Amino acid sequence: MIGASRNGGGRGLEARALTKRYASVAVVRGVDLVVRPGEVIGCLGPNGSGKTTTVRMLTGLTEPSEGTVLHDGRNIYGDLVAFRRRIGYVPEEAHLYPFLSGREYLELVGRLRELPVALLDKKIVSLLELFGILSAADQPLSGYSKGMKQKVLISAALLHDPDLLILDEPESGLDVTAVLVLRSLIMELARRGKAILYSSHIMESVERVCSRVMVLHRGAVVADDSAANLRTLMSRDSLEAVFAELVVQDNPARTASDIADVAAMRV
Amino acid sequence: MSSEPRRLLTAHFLRRLIDDDLISPNADRHESLSMFGAMLVSLGLFVSVLVSTKYLFNPYLTPAVAALSALFDRFMFTAAAMTATALVTLLVWDGLAIDARDASVLGAMPIRTRTIVAAKFSALVRFAAMFAGALNLAPSLITPWLMASKLPLSFVQLVLLILAHAAVVTMASAFGFFAVLAIRGLLQAVLGRTLFTRIAPAVQAALLVSVACAFLLLPVVASRVSRTWLEPQSRAAMMAPPLWFVGLQEMMVGNILVDLPRPRRLPARIAEADARATQLYRGARPLFPSLAITAAVKLTAVTVLAVLLFAWNNRRMVAPPPVAAGAAWLRRAIAAVARGVIRHPETQASFFFTLQAVLRSPQHRLTTAASLAFGLTAGVFAVAVGSATTRGTADAFAAGILAVQPVLLTALLAGFRHAVRMPAELAANWAVQVAWRGDTRPHIAGAKAAGALLFIAVPVLALVPFYWVMFTPPEALAIALCGLAGGAVVLEAIFLGYRKLPFACGYLPGDVKTIGPIAFAAFVFFTYQFSHLELAALRTGGAPTFAVLLTGAFATLRAVDAYRRRHPRPFEFDEMPEPPTQRLGLS
């Protein structure tokens, strides 16, 4: 099965009617989602729309109140460990062990993933070099900038060559060059048969790299199609305009003006 | 400028000092603070009543005997206040200066640096004052009252005794707090930020071990105070900071007790004891003025020094430099050796992560330092008990010396077992949880291997020169072998019930009230029996047999452990503790 999946023959990730409630308040409501091998699915939504909760349920870090998550047709909660062997995950917040160096952190993750030592060493050096942080490899993570931490997290997610990548705002803190590299990387990985879920606030990135876009609003899916189809269906010339049509309730220009007025208030 | 920003910043810094040690996702600051405060007050209350029994149950308590006994008690309270406050200050060592987060967040605010620095200092003083208040409140109110309950004391005199006690223990606490602050500030000023950042953890650990040992050895030291330290022209008295404050207290209210009128009809023996006590007390009196002056001068000096150094070191809002990497060749050498010995990748991961967490995470370093301090103190006690035993003097002394090794190893391993339960970094646990392959055994094996290296092999090697001097060289090597085997037995035994993923789960407090006394009794029993068996083995040439027996015990425990872990048991990474109402049986 793993072999099939590595060659793009698996069925990918599927979520059915995912719901998450915290104290009877539903933060995610009936989300259906399919990410097939070779696909990059974009997940868009305003703050508090339930993107991160959805992503955490898809990784198995948060248990859904209702609904199922299937990977290659199997419920991930049947064997969560087997599922996690095959995913790479970049979380929204770059929480790392501050007392480890970048190299030590990747060694820890690689060893936990049971990678052979020689291969692990080679991969760590190559990834850190390609991301441009090899010179800081032996410095503690507590001294890393946000972008450097993000590069370590992306490297850690790729170390074991996963079938499925779940990226929650991976561009956070990255410089322009690194963002361009990341976009190309995602497209390259998709070409090699990886299933990728890409959650982001940056429309341009989503439009460029994703084959399909899912828009979440108040915990529910309000659109799920290719960016081009969404533009056609909504008669808009950009994904940003589609997004504004779907989830933006107020006039942004008027809200901005109101904010500026509040900032300018005097006694 | 308005005092509002300073007030807000003080509250912010104070909350940070208290919040910094969160180790559980479910930790509640109010509950933790209430528990800690209640523990301090009740401890003070208990000790006050305990030390007062000698006044309450002495049918012939005379003023001079009370005054002489009070010296001993005042030393203990003063020293406890000083060392306990210093210990708590050491626990928040990293929070004793403006840190990187403060510099990055507050540095951009339109607030003067001196306002931020003043707020930080004010928060530190309040933090220490809160602790000192909770610690000293009960003893200040109760001890003088119980001490003088059988003496003809007026109300005003009693109030004076209470006020003097409160003032002196508060000053002693202030001395402990400012001394730590001054040491830290001095090192930072002299070494510069970069070098200081590198050595700060080692300095903190060394100070913590020293102060904790001093705190734990207080009862032993205090018993010698009135006998030897307060003799006229005593140099020892001038060397002991708590005694300076005892001298100050005696200068303030010492005459109240000793000059009280004696009952007219005292039995001859009691009158004689009172006369002897009066003579002893008056003999020590010439020392009090110089002790009091020393206390006042040194407290003022250390306070001024701490304030100046704090202001100097924080004069600019500069984030501390990142800690530079250590010796790469050493890390590579250890890694190469470990890879040769430990083959399983997950065990390797756990082994290295354990070494890194225990040596670098502030929480875990503190746990290690505390267990080392306890082990060293218990070792000193063991030797002292061995020296004081009159029967079979040579053997008892040798057993006391031999007990140092098992005592130290057991204390360190118990601390390690506790450290393993604490998360290395709560927010970063997700990384281990996501990469975990479903079997805890390789992780626990890796943690145990690291524990064996750090807390068995290293201390045993460090003790070899000591035993080389105290015994013959072959005996020292035999003792080292027994130490290695005995340590391995203890390590296996204390991990038998451990079921979670080391360093990667939320902390769930154990039932200390139930397990604590049992664990302590087991500790005393094991170390006592071990040292006596080891001595017998050394005397009869049976050390190899003893080592083989220990190895057999180790192998048996390993087999039991493997059997118990043959099926993986489910566990929760972030287990929720029972709510307080549940624990108290209210719901």
Image (cartoon, coloured by chain):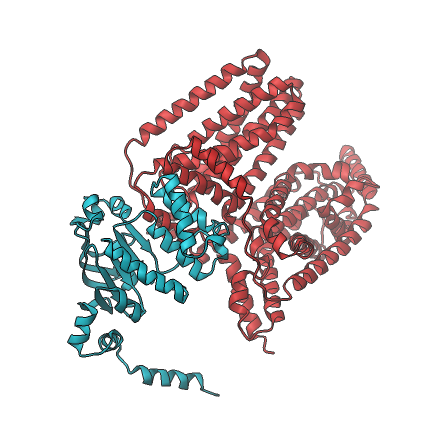
Chain colours: A cyan, B red
Of all residues, the one furthest to the top in this rendering is B540
| Residue shown at 26% from the left, 79% from the top | A249
**Residue A248 image point, x, y percent:** 26, 77
Residue A152 spot, x, y in % from top left: 41, 54
Position of the N terminus of chain B, as image quadrant, is bottom right
Q: Residue furthest bottom?
A: A267
- B422 left or right of A70 in image: right
Q: Nearer the viewer, residue B557 or A173?
A: A173
Is B458 drawn above or below residue A236 in the view shown? above
Q: Nearer the viewer, residue A239 or A94?
A: A239
User: Can the viewer see residue B482 in this picture?
Assistant: yes
Disc tally is: 0
* B305 sits left or right of A43 in the view: right
Residue at (51% x, 46% y) in the render: B360
Query: Which residue shows up at 49% across the image and 49% down it?
Result: A138
Where residue B199 sits: x, y (%)? 61, 49
Q: Is residue B138 visible?
A: no
Q: Quadrant of residue B347?
A: top left
Choose top left, top right, bottom left or bottom right for residue B155: bottom right
Residue B375 quadrant: top right
Query: Going by the image, does A6 lie left or right of B263?
Result: left
Is residue B298 or residue B312 the one in the foreground?
Answer: B312
Residue B297 image point, x, y percent: 77, 56
